[in-house]
Amino acid sequence: MSVADRIRVEQVTTLSDDWYVLKKTTFSFRRTDGEWQRQSRETYDRGNGATILLYDLQRRKVLLTRQFRYPAFVNGYDDLLIETPAGLLDKATPEERIKAEVEEETGYRVTDVSQVFEAFMSPGSVTERLHFFVGAYSAADQVSEGGGDPDEGEDIERLEPTIEEALRMIADGRIRDGKTIMLLQYAALHLFKETACLP
């Protein structure tokens, strides 16, 4: 269902174009009752991205990363954030980008990945559409130590919990990243058999 005929953009102002682009837009929206309502919203455009959960069915393991995230820290999370590898597309296809990000962040080179869904992670303010992937990995796929790009401020650690351990980490609050929780729940439902339920 298209809503294009219910939107009249009136003014767009760029508030910041530093790290990414922050805009303020004034528009009119035709409500369900037919009345036009004037609204103003700020949107943060950082481009679209991709993320992946790497899994090893034989060992029942998943490959995750840990890194410092200032926005989480400033909002009271005093620890490194546990996440699935991810990155912005930067004009690459989602599949191309996620393969490059996996190698850069984890040191593993994977060739066979599958996109499982797409999602807007914070549609009230951020324009990003995130492409979610899964892919099998093994020890033979490791080609470097990974760790991310120091020039981009990355200092990334790797960890390999079992799927059961990862689900417990969601339950006890050690994993709080939305994309990671979504992919681990997907894995529990679709990839790993006889996975223990969350406590």
Image (cartoon, grey):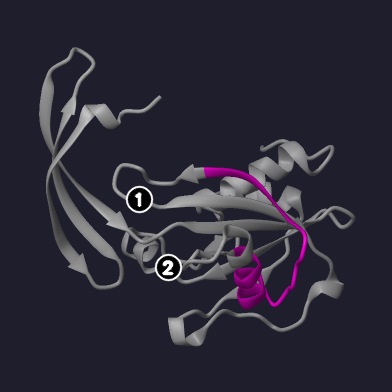
Of tags 2 and 1, the one toward the viewer is 1
Residue under circle 2? 69
Q: Give the total of numbered labels.
A: 2
Q: Residue at x 67, y 38 (%)?
A: 198
| Residue 48 x/y as whole percent | 45, 57
Residue at the location (19% across, 66% down)?
A: 16
Q: Which residues are magenta?
A: 98-118
Where's the C terminus, which quadrant? Answer: top right
Q: Residue 142 in the image: x percent, y percent?
A: 78, 77
Q: Is residue 105 magenta?
A: yes
Res 45 quadrant in image = bottom left
Q: Quadrant of residue 47?
A: bottom left
Dot 2 amino acid type: Arg
Disc 1 marks a residue whose amino acid type is: Thr
Determine crowd level at label 2: few under 14, some 14-19, many 20+ residues with C-alpha closer than 10 A. Answer: some
Quarter of the figure that contains the N terminus: top left
Seen from the viewer's position, the closer of residues 53 and 198 is 53
**In this view, 19 is above or below 170:** below
Label 2: element kind: loop
Identify the residue at the far top of this view: 33
Q: Residues within 10 Å of mark 1 (few under 14, many from 20)?
A: some
First in sequence: mark 2 or mark 1? 2
From where the camera sits, is residue 25 visible?
yes
156 or 168: nearer the viewer: 156
Residue at the image point whose x is 72% and y is 84% from the top: 144
State the residue in front, 90 or 175: 90
SS of the residue at dot 1?
loop
Separation of residues labelled 2 and 1 (CA atoms)? 19 Å
Q: Residue at x 74, y 48 (%)?
A: 164
From the image, tell me which residue sits under label 1: 127
Q: Based on the picture, tell me whether residue 75 belongs to the magenta stretch.
A: no
